[in-house]
Image (cartoon, rainbow, N blue to C red):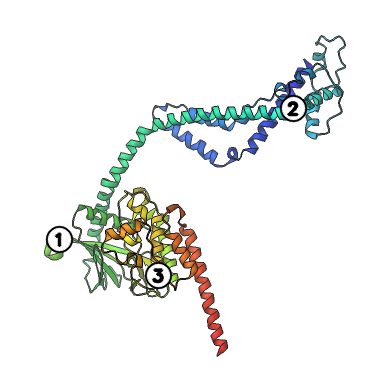
Amino acid sequence: MCISQIQDLIVVQLNQAVANKLTSSVDYLRESFVGTLERCLGSLEKSTPESCTHNVTSNHLKQILNAAYHVEVTFHSGSSVTRLFWEQIKQVGYPQCPVLARLVRRLTCVSPQIIHRITWVNPPSITAEWKRKVAQDAIESLSASKLARSICSQFRTRLNSSHEAFAASLRQLEEGHTGRLERTEDLWLRVRKDHAPRLARLSLESRSLRDILLHGKPKMGRELGRGQYGVVYLCDNWGGRHPCALKSVVPPDDKHWNDLALEFHYTRSLPKHERLVNLHGSVIDHSYSGGSSIAVLLIMERLHRDLYTGLKERLQIALDVVEGIRFLHSQGLLHRDIKLKNVLLDRQNRAKITDLGFCKPEAMMSGSIVGTPIHMAPELFTGKYDNSVDVYAFGILFWYLCSGSVKLPEAFEKCSSKDQLWTNVKKGSRPERLPTFDEECWQLMEACWNGDPSQRPLLGIVQPSLQSIMDRLCDNSDQKSGNLEDSN
């Protein structure tokens, strides 16, 4: 009985040590995402219809995480001759290992009276020293290789069985949520296609009524420019702000009305940012073209140049554009139409992004194909894309900035239609490298317009790269100026 107690105590301590060692050696069991996974599963189980899982999935995950603590170390798994040890007590020295020493000291607490119940002819003297020898021999009799094989086999078996049970319960949990997710998808589509445009249009109409009552109808000045969907005029003064720019848009149908209303909504809901053109207000003109059509007048901040007429401070402009795009992304929005015409300059040649007509929240992406062909990332044609399409468009814009020209790249010069442009982009055609390009600038362009969205750099990497290029070029310019002064 005494020997059995000693053996059991050793096994308990050894099991605990093995489990702790296994757990600490498997990094995944100590990663922070494990706690996140547990919380997510718990939340899903709580929201499962009719509570069909009863925390089964969470329990199976715990079994995986605790698999190491279910590995059983026995003296039979250590050596085939170990059982003989308990029948023949050998004389050994006191263990030198501090850990084993503490273990052996605990064995001295075993009651000597139990030992006398063993029917030995010549029972040994039950002393602390005798117990130490028994424990030491028990530990030394274990076969390390056999014990390791037994532990690995048990650990593998328990992990596999726990994982299979976890995967099965996870599939059951997924099935329980499938119906709910389908209903959520239907609601999401209804919000995107129906409710959001209606609310945006109501917001546009009510805001326009308020603005015309407070500030009156703006007076159109000379034409400043025109695009695909509207004409921009000068407006000397409106609502106490001057000078202003007035964008006149005549929506031909409900779809264009909805798109314009959403543009107005997203622009108005954005916090003010120094890299975005400010929208002051809107007015709906029912008397436009003699009352034959309705025009929406968007009154915005007047800037003095666009990139077609100002390409000198190109790197600073590129930095400003990246800053503006990053701000939009931080608000959950994609611009989807970054190009020369949609970047304006103030009197200090600092850039601001305008025309949020194609701007949408990332969660509201419908897979529609929008934008200007040469600036459009290839994945836009598949309908599956994310905010990296703005990185691609910036790469093309940066090519124009560095080239100092508005001419089409050679790869697209012979394209006679948008369809041909799209075809070339999808085939991998990109702008050529010009002799005047800086090596770092060219590498940055190529990275931004990479055909694989996952390989494009994040804007948080693009921005410091641009700053580094700008600092280097400025330093070189200063050195050249200094050399000229010295020579004079």
How many circles with numbers are drawn on the protein? 3
Q: Which amino acid does the dot numbered 1 rest on?
A: Ser
The N terminus: image quadrant: top right
Q: Is residue 21 above or below residue 132?
A: below
Q: Which residue is mark 3?
A: 401
Q: Which residue is mark 2?
A: 143
Expressed as whole percent of the image width and height from the top left, the position of residue 428 reads: 38, 58
Q: Which quadrant of the structure image shows residue 407?
A: bottom left
Q: Which amino acid does the dot numbered 2 rest on?
A: Ser
Q: Is residue 185 visible?
A: yes
Expressed as whole percent of the image width and height from the top left, the position of residue 183 reads: 32, 36
Q: Which residue is mark 1?
A: 293
As helix, strand or loop, the secondary structure at mark 2 comes to loop
At label 3, counting other C-alpha atoms closer than 10 Å, the crowd grade (few under 14, some 14-19, many 20 or more) is many
Left-right relation of 308 to 79: left
Q: Is residue 348 above or below residue 121?
A: below
Expressed as whole percent of the image width and height from the top left, the position of residue 145 reads: 71, 30
Foreground residue among 306 and 456: 456
As helix, strand or loop, the secondary structure at mark 3 comes to helix
Q: Which of the two discs, 2 and 1, labels the residue nearer the N terminus?
A: 2
Q: Which of the two discs, 3 and 2, labels the residue nearer the N terminus?
A: 2
Q: Is residue 346 above or below residue 326?
A: below
Distance in Å between CA atoms under marks 1 and 3: 39 Å
